[in-house]
Amino acid sequence: MTSFPVEIEPRPEPRLAALALLLHFAAAALPWVTRCPPWLAGSLSLLAIAAFVLTLARLPGRHCCLQGLMYRGEAWRVRLAGGPCDGPARIGPGTRVYADLIVLDVLTGRGRQGWLLTRAAVDSGQFRHLKARLRLAC
């Protein structure tokens, strides 16, 4: 099999961030609309807000710790914000590959990092290469 290199630095996705905000806002408001007891509604709303913060950390952009991903030869390398140029990485067990979405879980020296990538965030050729490489790795 021919090995093909993967090198991606995804573009920010404001539409995906807006969709995540809308869905998490609806999840935070729903307990109040359904007239749950105030202690339960408040707890569920706080959980929805915390989940939004964690989801936002997985979306590509300047705020994300993970800035770039490369596969050359037999090794994965990552570029992290505010750190060394690049470092070794492994693909984590939480990685999922769908037709138009990649949920990427990467294990680095700083711990677990990740992205939610759509086709719009990456060049189409690199997106196909990344999907194929991840399907082989998982």
Image (cartoon, rainbow, N blue to C red):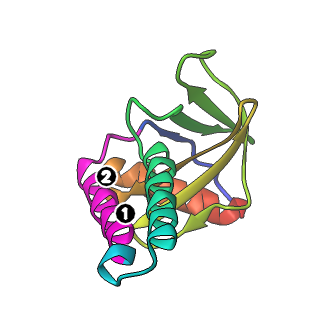
Residue at horizontal 43%, vertical 80%?
A: 36
Q: CB atoms at circles 1 and 2 under 8 Å apart? A: no
Residue at horizontal 31%, vertical 52%?
A: 17
Amino acid bearing label 1: His
Given residues 54 and 74, the one toward you in this image is 54
Give the mark nearest the N terminus, 1 or 2: 2
Given residues 32 and 128, the one toward you in this image is 32
Amino acid bearing label 2: Ala
Q: Position of residue 13 (x, y in %)?
A: 29, 48
For residue 116, above or below residue 40: above
For the residues labelled 1 and 2, the Cα–Cα distance comes to 11 Å
Residue at horizontal 66%, vertical 46%?
A: 106
* Res 29 quadrant in image: bottom left
Q: Is residue 82 magenta?
A: no
For residue 124, above or below residue 61: below
Given residues 126 and 95, the one toward you in this image is 95
* Res 31 quadrant in image: bottom left
Q: Which residues are magenta?
A: 10-30
Instruction: Specify the label residue 24 is tagged with.
Output: 1
Give the crowd class for mark 1: few <14, some 14-19, many >=20 residues within 10 Å.
Answer: many
Q: Quadrant of the C terminus?
A: bottom right
Image side of residue 106 versus residue 121, left or right? right
Q: Quadrant of the N terminus?
A: bottom right
Residue at horizontal 55%, vertical 16%?
A: 82
Give the crowd class for mark 2: few <14, some 14-19, many >=20 residues within 10 Å.
Answer: some
**Tag nearer the camera, 1 or 2:** 1
Instruction: Specify the label residue 17 is tagged with.
Output: 2
- State the predominant SS element of the stretch in magenta: helix
